[in-house]
Image (spheres, grey):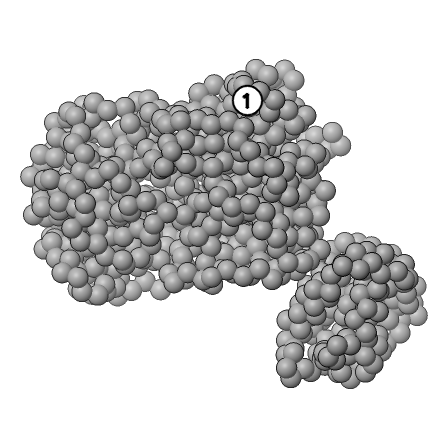
Amino acid sequence: MRKFQGSSKDAVFAGLQRSYRFGEFTVDADQKVLLRKSTPVPLAPKVFDTLLILVENAGRIVEKEALMNRVWPDTFVEESNLTFNIQQLRKALGDNARKPFFIETVARRGYRFIAQVSETSDKQAPDQNSGRDLEKRIIGIESGYGFKPASLSQPLKRAHQQRFRFILVISIFITLVAGGLAFYPWRNGNVDRNQPGLRARFQNAQITRLTSGKALKAAVSPDGKQVAYVLEEKEGQSLWLRRTAVESGVQIVSPHHVDFLGVNFSRDGDTIYYITSKPQKFEGTLYSVPVLGGPARRLLGNVGGPIGLSHDGKQIAFTICRAEVAGNIALMVASADGSNEHQLYVEHEPIGLSTGAPPAWSPDDSHIATLRTDSREVLSRFIAVNLKDGSLSDLSPNEWKLVDGLEWSTDGLFVSAQHKTDDNFQLWQINPANQTAQKMTNDLNRYDGISLASDRQTLATIQNVTLTQLWTVPIANPKNFKQITSGSSNYFDVAFTPNGKLLYSACTTGVGDLWQMDADDRNHSELTKNAGGNYSPVSSPDGHFIFFTSSRGKTYSIYRSLADGSEARKLTDDNEEEAEPDCSPDGKSVVFHNYLPGSWPLKKVSSEGGTPILLNDRWNRFPAISPDGNFVAVWHAEMFADDWQLALIPFKTGGKPIKTFSVAVAEGRIHWTRDGRGLLYIVTADGVSNIWRQPVDGGKPVAVTQFQNDLIFSFDISPDGKTLVCHRGTSANDVVLLNDLSNNGS
């Protein structure tokens, strides 16, 4: 490491009233931007400086030391930083180091710009708008960190698991934003706007959409001028950076088959923190990368979810989930560079802590807020953990289901969460002093994550807009698929009844209810109302009963009702969270699985109710009983971090799987073909879902449907085995900025 002395930083930009042209490129030295056929090519500031120096000295060797001296005056740097800049320039220019057209490496000396350059002087006075134009330039650079790609294509939807809790909520409606900018005053008649000590934020907000449908995570810089965000691409997930005033972004981390669990800016805005894990493993590694460019640095491993940064920027907080091996979830604290890691607080099952949202530091950094959960109950509460002694204090009542984003400022807690009154994720503001909450958004979209600028006037989040319809597909002629619903539909968890009608769930009032309709979209009838959230309906073989999951009690449990939804009653005598029922062919038993912190055991219970019987004590999802009643098909893993497989477990005796198929990412419900010879499941590749069939005898899986676009969220096979019904459509996830219009300057 060396320190270089030389000209001041201003000297780098001496004589900027010039532009340089070579090939199809123009270097605008005044505006500090590289253009390709009049289109800006995003470059980090130091990368642009490197290019400008080389172009100014076209045809001459620029020694490495001299080049570093000008790009990083009065700064300690490694030579690898210069090498990194040259790599980025070659990538931006489409150059080749071995056969260069633009930048030639001169061994042991430096670099030479070898293309023909023409210089154009600009003698006009500087444009008064040049400052604003400069502000619009993009700052960003691709990281050199590499990941090993996974072998499977990942679906274009978020695989985010929170506290191992069952919830399936698909938000359906038209998007609030069509284009780049819209105004939407959120008003909620049930909100108390005069709560003592709480300044209501974002009740009247300007909303700006920054992406085009494939965003997963977002963070806004402290000054509100930049946004870091994760995109889902064909090659995997990638990390991007853009100025909020500019319509394009720059890739910081190239696409890899990983899941990003969180993104944060440092409090000074100079660094971006991000956490990645293997797909659907939810145990990640924390990295940092400079905003102005440079390689990523590994800070910590075994991070269970997104991190929270202290307000002084010196510490981070995160969770570690040890539920599977030690039966606990711990709240951890470390220095911002990853050192001094230590446990602050721990909860043992069935009590837990949310791993889906970042812990949030109090404004004075004396406490850390998180959601305290109980797998025996639906509702949870926010707590504050004292950093000095680990003591707890309540920040809210037990009225929250799941939380996906959390910030703590002098205006209270800001959360994206499911409230007891709404199965949809909305943005809320909580007053810790009197433990009251008010909505900041009130619509049928979903909001994932929350990030505040330091002045609390700007908020970044992910807005999800899902638009779906129901389609039928003749299995013998899959190209003859037909849409059977229209309008602003919100059907999901679709299932056939024995007489050919369709059951489905719908969140028409914010909470899921069960409905029934004819297969031609007529005669819709509501089966549940004002009885918690109700999902995953299946009929008994004779059509007399419906089995479903409901939150009308303390937790999600399996219920049975008559076919018209009446006389609903809890089926088991357990108090553990239950999900995904399926009824046996003789109508006498129901299988389901629990959501426990350390496993998702597979169980069965009499259709008349009673004590469940354990079939498998490991990790199981979406059970389906074979037509002959001998097996349960299920997505299965021995350890949560293992690759999940399609498995067959004996229905009568339970035990370990007798056969497994490594076919695809575990995605959605499984259905048997009516002859019992095949298993149907969803496969999503490159943003398109189709139904595939795995022969039970072990042959190769084959595609059943031939859709060329859209996602499938749920499906079922008709009683005669000839037709599929698919709940399919689009799901757009965009970074949106909310700018508070009612509290400017405060």
Q: Which residue is mark 1?
A: 390
The tally of labels here is 1
**600, above or below 301, in the image:** above
Q: Can residue 473 be seen by looking at this rendering?
A: no
Rendered-image quadrant of the N terminus: bottom right
Q: Residue at x 36, y 26 (%)?
A: 350
Q: Residue at x 74, y 80 (%)?
A: 106
Place of residue 520 in the rendered image (x, y in percent of width and height, measured from the top left): 23, 48
Question: Quarter holding the C terminus?
Answer: top right
- Residue 96 picture location, percent across and down: 63, 79
Q: Is residue 162 left or right of residue 523?
A: right
Q: Amino acid at mark 1?
A: Gly
Q: Quadrant of residue 353?
A: top left
In the rendered structure, the answer to whether residue 96 lies left or right of residue 508 reads right
SS of the residue at dot 1? loop
Query: Which sits in the foreground, 163 or 733?
Result: 163
Residue 362 in the image, given as x and y percentages of width and height: 63, 26
Is residue 285 visible to us here?
A: yes
Other residues around mark 1 within 10 Å, as few (<14) / some (14–19) / many (≥20):
some
The residue at 76%/70% (across/down) is: 51
State whether residue 160 is above or below residue 391: below
- What residue is rendered at 21% in x and 50% in y? 647
To which quarter of the image does residue 325 belong?
A: top left
The spot of residue 257 in percent (x, y) is 45, 58
